[in-house]
Structures are given as C-alpha cells and as structure tokens.
Image (cartoon, helix red, strand yellow):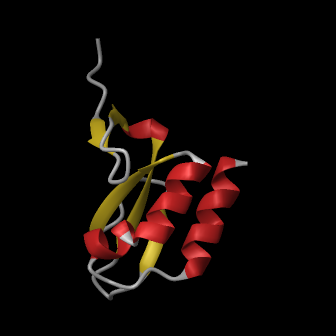
C-alpha cells in the first residue's frame, strides 16, 4: 500500500490528503503563485479546495501571514476558478 502524503489546511487546521488541497507558494523572487504541481520552489501554504475557505483566507489575511508577503486579489480569483 502506498503512503498518502497528508498536509494541513492553514484556515481549517484539518489534516487532509495533499490532493484535496491547493498549494499557494511565495517564490524566492517574492512572487505569489498557485502551485498545481505541489513541487514549486519557495514557501508554501495549503488551502482546502472550498470557496468558504478561500473567502476566510482573504478576509482574515492568514495567507499573507503564512507567506510573509501581501497576496494580490488576483490569486484569490484564480483559486475560485479552480473550484468551479
């Protein structure tokens, strides 16, 4: 049996399989991107694939604190597109 990697959502604090989460990463250049591969270089934070979680992350600015940089609104709009 293959081991399933588990990660913690920064908003809900739930431990979930990595495939059920979306990784947002701050690259070494300071740019914020959505990492669909899960392997991009930089500081990452995981969010559950749920609209409510994205809204809460935006209003509470928890993603800004985890990535230690201002996250542009465009990132939150892109996240919502992945959930459709």
Q: Which residue is drawn at 47% across and 73% down?
A: 33
Residue 37, visible in the rendered structure: yes
Residue 71: image quadrant is bottom left
Residue 20 at x, y = what percent? 47, 37
Outermost residue toward the bottom?
29
Q: Which residue is drawn at 29% across and 41% down?
A: 7
Q: Residue at x 65, y 53 (%)?
A: 82
For this rendering, which residue is in front, 56 or 34? 56
Left-right relation of 5 to 51: left
Residue 42: image quadrant is bottom left
On the rendered image, what quadrant is the N terminus found in? top left
For this rendering, which residue is in front, 39 or 79? 79
Above or below for 46 versus 5: below
Above or below for 21 versus 24: above
Above or below for 78 versus 73: above
Left-right relation of 71 to 13: right
Residue 45 at x, y = what percent? 33, 60
Q: Residue at x 35, y 47 (%)?
A: 9
For this rendering, which residue is in front, 31 or 83? 83
Residue 3 at x, y = what percent? 26, 23
Left-right relation of 56 to 45: right
């Amino acid at each position: 049996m293959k081991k399933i990697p588990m990660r913690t959502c920064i908003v809900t604090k739930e431990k979930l399989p990595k495939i059920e989460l979306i990784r947002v990463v701050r690259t070494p250049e300071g740019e914020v991107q959505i990492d669909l591969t899960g392997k991009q270089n930089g500081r990452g934070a995981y969010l559950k694939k749920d609209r409510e979680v994205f809204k809460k992350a935006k209003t509470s600015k928890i993603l800004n604190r985890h990535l230690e940089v201002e996250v542009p609104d465009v990132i939150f709009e892109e996240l919502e597109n992945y959930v459709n």
